Amino acid sequence: MPRKARKAALRRETRETRIEVELQLDGSGRSRVECADAFLKHMLETLARFAGFDLRAKASGDDAHHISEDLAITLGRALRQALGDAAIRRIGSALVPMDEALTQVAVDLVDRPFCDAPVPGEQFVHFLRSLAIEGRFTLHVQVLRGSDAHHVVEATFKALGLALREAVTPVAGEIRSTKGRPTLGPSRSRSS
């Protein structure tokens, strides 16, 4: 039986930004990113290539901070939507060198949002945090060495792409956690 396509298309419009994201998890690493920030554009293309995702993103807004944040929010939500409830490997990690830089990234796509990403530049710290929180996954970044901020950030995005590629790999089974799927409903209290 063929597997359901794992993709999402989302739009986010605020008074500050207009964002469109189309994401296909089982892609070939193709991307088309329209964004005024050339380095952010390059990082999104790098992430898609190393993750093997097909990504189309279009972003405009009043300033670089808002565009970066809202792109991360929308991309995180698209990732979560594209994953659906299918069983996946869930955990992925990668160690990536780039010249003098060496970074390690680990992810757990288990619906427990957390981010520790001490990369250079507040813009990319905030981007990675927003991506993890909205994607509802755990993200750890370790910068093992590196003096060139560009190299450290790019190695981080490459490692994140490789870690996500591993984590989204489909596996046999029906649950992502040993806890099973949580059941949400009204709380019930016992009378004494």
Image (tube, helix red, strand yellow):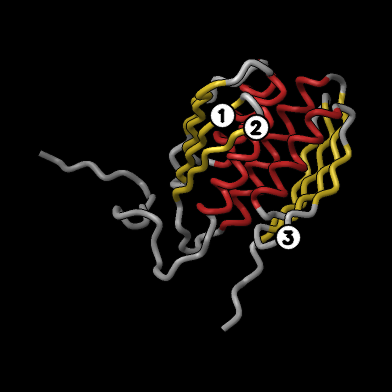
Reading the image, the residue beneath label 1 is 102
Q: Nearer the viewer, mark 3 or mark 2?
A: 2
Residue drawn 48% across the image and 32% down it: 140
Q: Disc 1 marks which amino acid?
A: Leu
Q: Is residue 148 left or right of residue 118?
A: right
Q: Earlier in the sequence, mark 3 or mark 1?
A: 3
- Res 36 quadrant in image: top right
Mark 3 or 2, nearer chain start: 3
Q: Which residue is mark 2?
A: 98
Dot 2 alpha-carbon crowd within 10 angstroms: few under 14, some 14 to 19, many 20 or more: some
- Label pair 2/1, CB-CB below 8 angstroms: yes
Q: Is residue 100 above or below residue 13?
A: above
| Total marks in image | 3
The answer to whether 57 appears left or right of 50 in the picture is right
**Mark 3–mark 2 distance (CA, rounded to whole Å):** 22 Å
Left-right relation of 7 to 83: right
Quarter of the N terminus within the rendering: bottom right
Q: Which residue is mark 3?
A: 28
SS assignment at label 1: strand
| Residue at image location 74% in from the left, 35% down from the top | 43
Residue 165, above or below 97:
below
Q: Nearer the viewer, mark 3 or mark 1?
A: 1
